[in-house]
Image: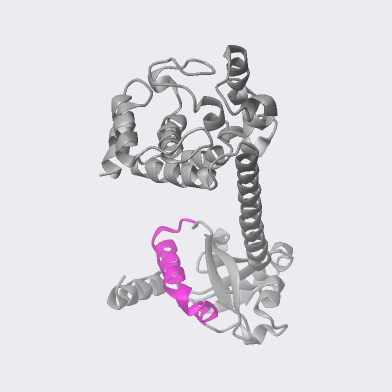
Amino acid sequence: MRNRERWVITQILKKKRGSKSASGKSYANHPLFQNSYDGILLIDSGQKICYINPSFLALYGTPDPCMVIGKQFLDTISETYKETVLSMLELFELTRTPTQPVEVEICNYEHKPISVCVWITDTEQNIKEMTHIYVRDISEWKKAQSYLTQANLELGDAYRDTLEGWGRALELRDHETQGHTKRVTEGAIQLAMMLNISIEKIKNIRYGAMLHDIGKMAIPDSILLKPGPLDASEWQIMKLHPVYARDMLSEINFLKSAITIPYFHHEKWDGTGYPTGLKGEEIPIESRIFTIIDVWDALLSDRPYRKGWPREKVIQYIRENKGIYFDPKIADIFLKLQQ
């Protein structure tokens, strides 16, 4: 609102409401005003502070009401928030409708900023010429919020570091190519972002990819580390590792939502995968994304039982298995990224 418009509104309101009356003093002496936990101010039509309660004095940092009374209310507000509070006052003057609390800062007696919530309401009908302002100190709450945010960040880092450690331990036990877990995690996240997957699903992809083979911890070394091909009975045991992963992770609240990849990443688009034989879009999209990345990295990498394939051969394998092993739409997007 422009200065000229503000001046016109102020003049109109001054004529309508007049100056403060004795009723304001009576209201300010009321126990509810004096004993309120929140700071309360009464300001006149010129936005001058007429009455304040002890809580606002304490917030402002002085025991002397004379240091506050007579000041312009906006002079107590930090420069950054003056326009916000002025807009609140103007809206209230026009509508006489109580405002919602707004987070701003006031400058106390020592010119130090204090985080507060401010809202404006009306007083009793007999002192309608006054504007009633509440000011609540939220500085401690803001500190607690900051500490909580930092604690959550640190906890998230600790979870991530733990999962990465588990992933590296699995690579060592399974004689997996070093860095496989990190590569497939980063690759799956990149592909998910290309598909505009939600942030929540991307978080699940991150944690699920880190733990995609955690179920192999329950597979005997004689099978997991066997240098030659597995026989039929050994293969049936190996195919249980997604089930073991589901059972292990379902007991950890933090990781329940990340079960999708460890449990379903061996399912195939045509329904011939394991452990449940899901088909097409029955397979969660997180797993459909991860499967392509996992196969891509596995085929490119040297393993104890074979050399890594050339890049073009892996691209051809994925192209040939669209609609069989892989989601064809996701495979097409992945292959475009490899061009």
Q: Main secondary structure of the magenta part?
A: helix
Q: Is residue 228 left or right of residue 279?
A: right
The image quadrant where one finds the N terminus is bottom left
Q: Is residue 311 left or right of residue 149?
A: left
Please say whether residue 45 is visible from this viewpoint. Answer: no
Q: Position of residue 86 (x, y in %)?
A: 43, 71
Q: Residue at x 40, y 46 (%)?
A: 190
Q: Is residue 231 above or below residue 131?
A: above
Q: Residue at x 66, y 48 (%)?
A: 162
Q: Is residue 77 above or below residue 230?
A: below
Q: Is residue 317 above or below residue 277?
A: below
Q: Is residue 174 above or below residue 121?
A: above
In this picture, which residue range is highlighted in magenta? 72-98
The image quadrant where one finds the C terminus is top left
Q: Residue at x 63, y 18 (%)?
A: 237
Q: Is residue 131 left or right of residue 240?
A: left
Q: Position of residue 166 (x, y in %)?
A: 65, 43
Front residue of 94 and 282: 282
Front residue of 157 and 209: 209
Query: How many numbered tags mark residues here?
Result: 0
- Check if residue 74 falls in the magenta segment: yes
Please say whether residue 206 is visible from this viewpoint. Answer: yes
In this view, the residue farthest toward the top is: 232
Front residue of 79 and 56: 79
Q: Residue at x 48, y 76 (%)?
A: 47
- Check if residue 15 falls in the magenta segment: no
Q: How is the image coloured?
A: one colour
Q: Position of residue 212 (x, y in %)?
A: 56, 34
Q: Position of residue 87 (x, y in %)?
A: 41, 67
